[in-house]
């Protein structure tokens, strides 16, 4: 996938739905609840990120699955309609803005469990790799029925088992899919959420040509510098973009389902840090960079990334 680097993703969708539109997203569907209850709010959030300087609208499908909607009382037909609607809304917001990309968000199986497993990778002993392949295949098949997806974003992947499932699915569908990016949630300077080394995950995925970007998200900013070193040191990543979109630093309480804001990073510091990491990638390897934010990151953070990049003059002109 060709794009001007750095490419700027949006920030947290649920964050803005809660803070700007006062949505109660405490249920198992999280932001996907608004696909039915208030699609205009989702469209407005996409628009606010474009106005802040983002190049990408990430669909409201992170938490969306057939089983999730069934458990919430929807029929299968309604679930399919709402999952496709996530792409439609993002496409409409992009078209209204006049430029940009649509990324299809494929959150992890743990997100559907709604018990914090996307931050631990602990899915229990009953789930198999084939189960995870089937889970992601069903969601992809439904969402890709709706036109307008520029790339697929498997995000907040917390376990090596799920990484293997994604690898198998991409191999299976390699001729059908648009470009794919894969991003891991990490718990330390070098490990994803289940304790597997990030390096091991990159070795697995790096040889798939259809994956154009790899990286980390929904990870504390304090870990990004060290994780970036891991990303840059992996030889299989040389022809792939580096994907970085940490959270805002706040700690998520999976039991109370709310945020502890005492550890959050300021928008200005967040923007400068992201621009600094982009400059590091450009200087060391010349690889393309995709930047953005996750939970707790709003339009002001994205605006600060854009401003910091412009001040630092990090442009494609510097790429070899």
Image (tube, rainbow, N blue to C red):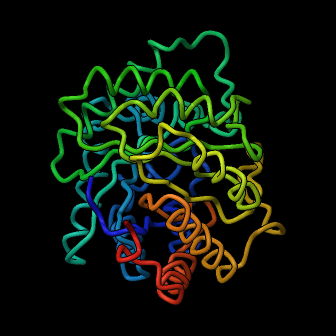
Residue 271 appears at what percent x and percent y? 60, 77
Residue placed furthest toward the front: 320
**Horizontally, is 40 left or right of 247 in the view?**
left
Above or below residue 126? Residue 141 is below
Residue placed furthest toward the right: 262
Q: Quadrant of the C terminus?
A: bottom left
Above or below residue 295? Residue 123 is above
Residue 27 appears at what percent x and percent y? 58, 46
Q: Residue at image x 24%, y 50%? A: 149
Q: Residue at image x 33%, y 68%? A: 43
Residue 61 appears at what percent x and percent y? 39, 46
**Horizontally, is 276 left or right of 257 in the view?**
left
Q: Nearer the viewer, residue 174 or 12?
A: 174
Q: Nearer the viewer, residue 30 or 181?
A: 181
Residue 259 appears at what percent x and percent y? 74, 60
**Horizontally, is 260 left or right of 266 in the view?**
right
Q: Nearer the viewer, residue 28 or 231?
A: 231
Q: Residue at image x 59%, y 70%? A: 274
Q: Residue at image x 18%, y 29%? A: 175
């Amino acid at each position: 996938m060709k794009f001007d680097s750095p490419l700027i993703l949006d920030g947290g969708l649920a964050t803005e739905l809660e803070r700007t539109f006062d949505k109660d997203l405490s249920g198992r569907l999280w932001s996907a609840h608004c696909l039915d209850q208030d699609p205009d709010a989702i469209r407005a959030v996409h628009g606010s990120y474009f106005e802040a300087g983002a190049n990408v609208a990430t669909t409201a499908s992170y938490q969306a699955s057939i089983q999730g909607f069934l458990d919430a009382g929807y029929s299968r037909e309604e679930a399919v309609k709402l999952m496709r609607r996530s792409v439609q809304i993002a496409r409409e917001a992009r078209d209204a803005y006049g430029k940009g990309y649509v990324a299809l968000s494929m959150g992890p199986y743990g997100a559907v469990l709604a018990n914090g497993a996307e931050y631990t990778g602990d899915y229990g002993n009953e789930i198999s790799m084939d189960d995870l392949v089937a889970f992601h295949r069903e969601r992809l098949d439904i969402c890709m029925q709706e036109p307008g997806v520029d790339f697929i974003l498997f995000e907040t992947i917390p376990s090596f088992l799920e990484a293997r499932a994604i690898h198998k699915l991409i191999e299976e569908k390699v001729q059908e899919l648009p470009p794919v990016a894969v991003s891991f949630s990490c718990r330390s300077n070098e490990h994803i959420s289940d304790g597997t080394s990030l390096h091991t995950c990159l070795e697995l995925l790096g040889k798939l040509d259809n994956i154009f970007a790899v990286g980390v998200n929904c990870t504390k900013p304090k870990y990004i510098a060290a994780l970036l070193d891991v990303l840059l040191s992996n030889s299989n990543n040389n022809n792939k973009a580096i994907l970085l979109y940490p959270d805002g630093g706040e700690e998520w309480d999976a039991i109370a389902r709310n945020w502890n804001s005492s550890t959050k990073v300021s928008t200005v510091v967040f923007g400068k840090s992201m621009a600094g990491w982009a400059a590091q990638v450009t200087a060391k390897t010349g690889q393309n960079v995709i930047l953005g934010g996750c939970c707790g990151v709003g339009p002001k953070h994205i605006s600060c990334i854009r401003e910091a990049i412009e001040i630092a003059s990090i442009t494609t002109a510097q790429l070899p």
